[in-house]
Amino acid sequence: MSILVFAESLSGSIKKQALEATAYAHQAAKVIGGEVVALTIGQAEGAATLGEYGASKVYQVAVDSFDAQVYANIISQAAEKVGAKMVVFAHSSSGKSLVGRVAMRLNAASVTSATSLPEVNGDALNIKKSVFSGKGIATYALTGDVKVVSVSNNTFRPEVVGTTATVESLDVTIPASRITVKDTKTVSGVVPLPEAELVVSAGRGLKGPENWGIIEDLATELGATTACSRPVADADWRPHHEHVGQTGVAIKPNLYFAIGISGAIQHLAGVNSSKVIVVINKDPEAPFFKAADYGIVGDLFDVVPKITEAMKRFKTKNA
């Protein structure tokens, strides 16, 4: 019996989310037994490091571009070849597109965005996840021979538990893709929002895109990723991939700065799982303060540069 982890590498290298999924599988194996086997598809620089996070074997399948149908077919074949009783994904955009397809092919029970390790309950495995935009926790009882799980981002910290593994080719039948990829545009040089542990976000309180420099300065000093509210993205002040909230990217960083954002419920739904929320707003009645761990009532154009300068002094003193 084994647990198969799909280690995502769509950017050409192993992502942090893949390490989190592998760490989850390693912990799950202590509960349900079996060894952890990792699978990479396409180019996967650093695949051998998956062994450090709990994978006893790493298999590689060469495919040129992402096609959810093709990937689901390959992953399902791999699961059958290694006798997987559980298949684990990161809860990324590609993971979301694969969980249902793989579960259907394997006739498996599934749960997405898991926030707990499995608990044995007779013939079932109980796994918890957040529901209703983080306002509740639901327990799913997964039955059947195979379970398919995607792991909530920034929930299970990857820890080194072993050494690098040998990467081997896996012999599977690769179906023909019905999709033609004509162009791919990626964002480079920054930590993707779903993986970011520190996020500095701003809203219409910035008054215009010309003022975004103070947000980027703070993010640089913190080593954070920048984000924005939906009105900012809709106004083309910032690119849409930075939009966080219910209709954008849902995130759960360790630290989230909300600057000049009122805190509409749609925005809160995508960020309220953040471990620490800091709100800066000149309106003391802004709804976001109710969700904040720390709040500063003041003009962001005065407050943010002072925080940035304080960070510079702190880093210089502790260099």
Image (cartoon, helix red, strand yellow):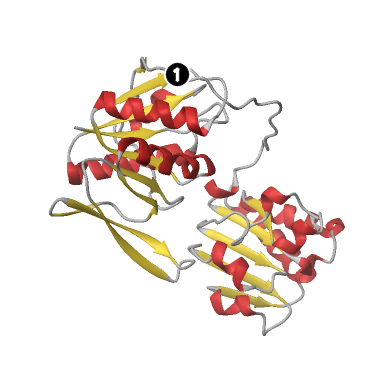
Image point (59%, 54%), residue name: 249
Residue corresponding to mark 1: 174
Q: Nearer the viewer, residue 164 or 251?
A: 251
Residue at image position (65%, 58%) is 200
Total labels drawn: 1
Q: Position of residue 151 (x, y in %)?
A: 40, 48
Q: Position of residue 66 (x, y in %)?
A: 55, 29
Which quadrant of the figure has residue 284?
bottom right
- The answer to whether residue 48 is visible is yes
Q: Indicate left or right for 303 with 275 as reference.
A: right
Residue 33: x and y in percent read: 17, 39
* Left or right: where 211 falls relative to 163: right
Q: Is 296 situated left or right of 214 in this image? A: left
Q: Could you say where residue 201 lies in the image, as x and y percent from the top left?
A: 67, 60
The answer, for residue 53, to whether it is visible in the render is no
Work out which quarter of the rendered image holds the N terminus and state it. top left
Residue 77 is drawn in which quadrant? top left
> Residue 204, relative to residue 313: is it above or below?
below
Q: Residue furthest left?
A: 122
Residue at (50%, 57%) from the top-left corner?
A: 254
**In terms of depth relative to the viewer, which is nearer, 59 or 166?**
59
Q: Amino acid at mark 1?
A: Ile
Dot 1: few (<14), some (14–19), or many (≥20) neighbours within 10 Å? some
Is residue 230 toward the left or the right of residue 317 in the image? right
- Disc 1 on helix, strand or loop? loop
Q: Nearer the viewer, residue 67 or 276?
A: 67
Asked if residue 248 is positioned above or below residue 147 in the image, the reply reads below
